[in-house]
Image (cartoon, rainbow, N blue to C red):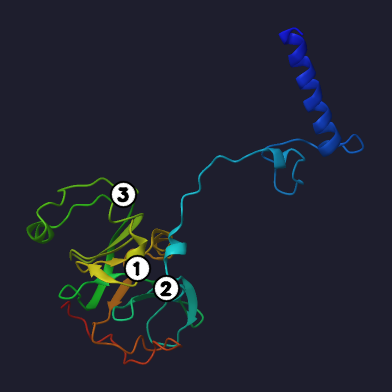
Amino acid sequence: MARSAKLNLFIGAVALVVAGTSFGSAKAEPLSLFAPDGYRSSSIDRYIRDDRVEEPTARAEVPARLRRQVVAYTGNEAPGTIIIDTPNTYLYLVMPGGKAMRYGIGVGREGFTWSGVEHVTRMAEWPDWHPPAEMIARQPYLPRFMAGGPTNPLGARAMYLGSSVYRIHGTNAPETIGQRVSSGCIRLANEDVIDLYGRVKTGAKVVVMPISSRGGVAGVSGASARTADTRGSARIN
């Protein structure tokens, strides 16, 4: 049998299988790979294989207690204030209506924690990284500059605190959330720092609790909410 005849027979067989098992002749519906919202899925959908590889999210790597959630807040800080619960590795953003958004964070390792009151003086998306001289002195192998992007240690967003070297920023190592590993900066999973960044304004007050405040944040309901108000601790240690 000629090659063209074989090909025609093969195509005809495939057409019969598809016609007999999938679409039918009684119904007619639009075939669309990208159906607008509200349209039913096309009959061809189950024959389309999506080859896109979804990037794994930080959420799956963060323990449940450190995942972003709304909690009750009855403390004295005004909405828009950020409270860093250093010992319990939480960041709270005070919201209106007696609520706060709680995020899991990574904090400074032993000897690099600090406390006090600062303000957000600058905000940046996918920030460049310029390791401070003090960090380079301790770790001379560090680059002197790294452009912003997915491999940058500052992650997707950064909020700079006063004139200090400290920042609230994202991380490309979400497994470090809940740990004490940084040189004093506060880190969040990228998806959380993006959420926080969208809620915070330049000038926002940032209260950083000392590592000795084991009880938690005053006014927050739950097991980590039994400590005195820390607003008087205005000095960076």
- The number of callouts visible is 3
Spatial separation of the CA atoms under disc 1 and disc 2: 8 Å
**Residue 66: numbered disc:** 2
Circle 3 residue: 151
The answer to whether residue 195 shows anywhere in this view is: no
Badge 1 amino acid:
Ile
Point out residue 12 in the picture as x, y percentages from the top left corner.
Answer: 81, 21
Residue found at the far right of this picture: 26
Residue found at the far front of this picture: 1
Q: Earlier in the sequence, mark 1 or mark 3?
A: 3
Name the side, left or right, on which 97 lies relative to 58. Answer: right
- SS at circle 3: loop
| Label 3, residues with CA under 10 Å away: few <14, some 14-19, many ≥20 | few
Position of the N terminus by quadrant: top right
Residue depicted at x 21% and y 69%: 184
Circle 1 residue: 177
Residue depicted at x 23% and y 87%: 212
- SS at circle 1: loop
Badge 3 amino acid:
Thr
| Label 1, residues with CA under 10 Å away: few <14, some 14-19, many ≥20 | many
**Residue 74: numbered disc:** none
Point out residue 106 in the picture as x, y percentages from the top left corner.
Answer: 31, 69
Spatial separation of the CA atoms under disc 1 and disc 3: 17 Å
Name the side, left or right, on which 30 lies relative to 183. Answer: right
Point out residue 16 in the picture as x, y percentages from the top left corner.
Answer: 84, 28
Badge 2 amino acid:
Leu
Q: Earlier in the sequence, mark 3 or mark 2?
A: 2
Q: Nearer the viewer, residue 78 or 194?
A: 194
Q: Nearer the viewer, residue 111 or 119?
A: 111
The answer to whether residue 131 shows anywhere in this view is: yes
Residue found at the far left of this picture: 137
